[in-house]
Amino acid sequence: MKKNLLATSALIAAGALASQGALAEAKPIDLKVGGYYEQWVGMIFQDSDAAGNHPSNADELDVQEDGEIHFKGSMTADNGLTFGVNVQLEASTSGDQIDENYLFVRGSFGEIVLGAENGPAYAMHYGTDIDKGIGLEEGDGGVYWFRSTSSGSDGQGGTHWQLHTSRNVIIDNDSQKIRWISPRFEGFQIGLSYAPEGRDDKDDRVPNELDNVGTYEQIAAGAVNFDQTFDDVRVRISAGGQYVGDHNTKVNGSEDSVWAVSTGIRIGVGGFEGTLAYGHTNGAGPAKAEQVDVVTAGISYTDGPLGVSLTGAYGWTQNDEPGSPASPATETSPAIAAVEAGRDAEQFTLQLGVQYKVGPGVSINGAAIYARSSDLIAEDVDFTGFGVVGGVKLSF
């Protein structure tokens, strides 16, 4: 018995020494640099019913850029689990200087993400992101070119209604969350996520505190998609949704809940690819838009280094909430500002894109873009814009 105990102890000690040796030989995660960078030049012609020196009334040559530097690294442990990190730095000064940033663990169970990353309803959605020019679903037309459209961020009419994308982005985008995406089985994959707050958790606030206004909380999301090839036809289908548990006094109009759903289908055969997608957001639209709906569609063709695409988006809002006039201050009550009545707005965007791949990670792209909106900038104000842009896109 004593000999057996001694032998067992020796085996345990040898195993411990071997494990320590393996750990000593293991190296920490090495970060690799990647990302993308784009420069664009374009001529834009804009006209609207807005009076005066409004940004939607302009004809000009413009230069725009977009880029991110990605720091990524991972290692696989002896137990088979892969641990990694991804931090994405904006290439120019931005209000969101660090974009997505998260830690992930991968294994036979799929992938778990902890950090600021898109939820499954966004990441697993098959939208109309097959552009060969600029990004339609990404809102490049509004952010970089046509001011005061649904993506406007210049503080002069931009409403962030996101009438260009079928993805669920109004409620939650890159907030801190826990996300799980399963392995793919027979073409199917599922994903779930939960975010305590609808923004990056870096403001020293405790979730659900009484005065933590200005953001949604308790955001649950789920999605399922399908990706399978039948002979020479590749079929991809997705469906996802989000639900907000705590509206935090942000609910517009008479809506009792805030939620969003999206679905998309993409079919590819040979060099052709076609897509149709739809997204609906309920009770979360800004500027008193109780409902936001967007339909996107497109077709593309790729032959070797050359590619062309035609993509479009039509979005509209619905709201029946009445406004109220301003009232002056009295001896017993302060002045009350006027409240804008809810209004219905719509926007149509169409883009013809072309791409030529010069080499690995380098392409020359061009696009002709048309945009039209009604009541989006303001009540009874229509906007029309046309632009021709070209650029160089680098990925590394």
Image (cartoon, grey):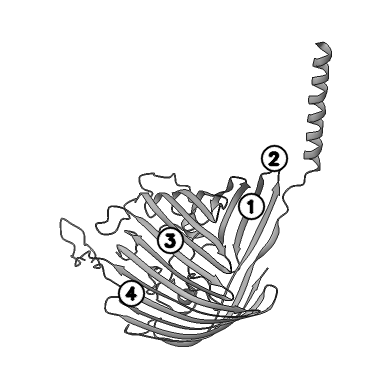
Question: Visible in this render: residue 64?
Answer: yes
Q: Of marks 3 and 1, which one's residue comes earlier in the chain?
A: 1
Mark 2: amino acid: Asn
User: SS for tag 1?
Assistant: strand
Find residue 47 and name its label: none
Camera-side mark, 2 or 4:
2
> Residue 54: percent from the left, percent from the top?
37, 82
Residue 317 percent coordinates (x, y): 31, 68
Q: Which residue is drawn at 68% across and 72% down?
A: 361
Instruction: Please provide percent x and percent y for residue 235.
Output: 52, 65
The three-letter code of the residue at mark 3 reads Asn
Residue 346: give its label: 4
Which numbered marker is on residue 85? 1
User: Would you identify the image quadrant in which residue 65 lies?
Assistant: bottom right
* Inter-mark Cα distance, 2 to 4: 53 Å
* Residue hosting label 3: 168
Other-residue count near label 2 (Cα within 10 Å), few / some / many at <14 / 14–19 / ≥20: few
Instruction: Give the left or right position of residue 389, taking residue 73 as reference.
Output: left
Q: Do the residues labelled 1 and 2 touch (CB within 8 Å)?
A: no
Q: Of the residues shown, which amino acid type is indicated by label 4?
A: Glu
Nearer-N-terminus badge (2/4): 2
State the residue in front, 148 or 271. Answer: 271
Relative to residue 116, is residue 12 drawn left or right?
right
Query: Marks 3/1: CA distance?
Result: 25 Å
Q: Is mark 4 on a helix, strand or loop?
A: strand
Whole-number angstrom distance, CA of label 3 to CA of label 2 = 36 Å
- Secondary structure under tag 3 reads loop
Q: Using the numbered discs, state the Cα–Cα distance from disc 1 to disc 4 in whole angstroms.
A: 40 Å
**Mark 4 or mark 1, which is nearer the start of the sequence?**
1
Residue 79's tag is 2
